[in-house]
Amino acid sequence: MKIKILGTRGEIEESAPYHSKKSGVLINKTLLLDCGQKSFLDYKPKALLITHLHPDHAYFVRHDEKPSINIPIYAPEGFDELAIHIKKKSFKIGTYTITPIPTLHSAKVQSNAYLIKHKGKKILYTGDMIWIEKKYHKLLKNIDLVITEASFIRKGGMVRKKKETGQIYGHTGVPNSISLFKKFAPKILFMHFGAWFYKNIKQARKKIKKLAEEHNIEIVVGYDGLELTI
Ligand SMILES: [Zn+2]
Ligand SMILES: [Zn+2]
């Protein structure tokens, strides 16, 4: 699988050239995972898979104009009059098998990670998340690469709770993601960087690399335009 990381900036102000575009990952020039920038559609993917309808993952949520996207769009829930496919179980797009896996992230929008299988390779793209419920962990076996978010470097990330419902929302921390995903994959790629990363990017990269050593796992620090093959 050829993977191109199109954007690595989280929902914060733009400040660094290699981390300026919002979330987007292109698989084999065919599948687009999240579309934080309208320009990502210029790659002419065959389908768009959106983890959740926050504007840094689905640019059109914040636009007034009606988006004209003429490829199939998959997301955890519908939006306006867009023809969105809502899938709860595994489905096929050409030779790709896609499994949506619910994630905990927002109190307002639903969110999915996507497990993508193609020609014996398996990747997981999570989008933003706090956690994936235990009952789904059996789906996460033998993944070649996990691509996930790095909004917060601190353990615990930023998790809040709705008083009325007890529902939690927010983002996990990088150490928690590593602890979770090292059980399922030999390699993790981080993107969707938060404010901590931009304060000193060199130091930030070092912090992540240090965690990789501590946890004895391969970690890739994403940047806009990074290409890798698995
Ligand atoms: Zn986000
Ligand atoms: Zn989000």
Image (tube, rainbow, N blue to C red):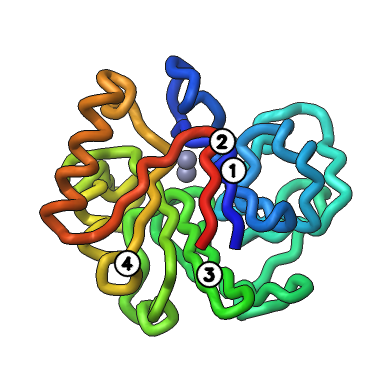
The answer to whether mark 2 is within 8 Å of ligand 1 is no
Give residue 185's position: percent from left, percent from top.
Answer: 34, 69
Residue 70: x and y, percent?
Answer: 88, 49
Q: Mark 4 sits on what residue?
A: 186
Tag 4–tag 1 contact (CB < 8 Å): no
Q: Is residue 48 left or right of residue 188?
A: right
Residue at 58%, 74% (x, y): give it: 117
Which residue in the protein does label 2 denote? 225
In this rendering, the answer to whether 57 lies above or below 76 is: above
* Disc on the earlier residue, 3 or 4: 3
Q: Which residue carries the number 3 mark?
A: 115
Q: What secondary structure is marked by label 3?
A: strand
Q: Nearer the viewer, mark 3 or mark 2?
A: 2
Q: CA distance from mark 3 to mark 2?
A: 22 Å
In front of the other: 151 or 184: 184
Of callouts 4 and 1, which one flags the residue occurring earlier in the amino acid sequence? 1
Residue drawn at (76%, 57%), measured in percent from left and top?
A: 47
Asked if the residue under mark 1 is in contact with the one under mark 2, i.e. CB atoms within 8 Å, the reply is: no
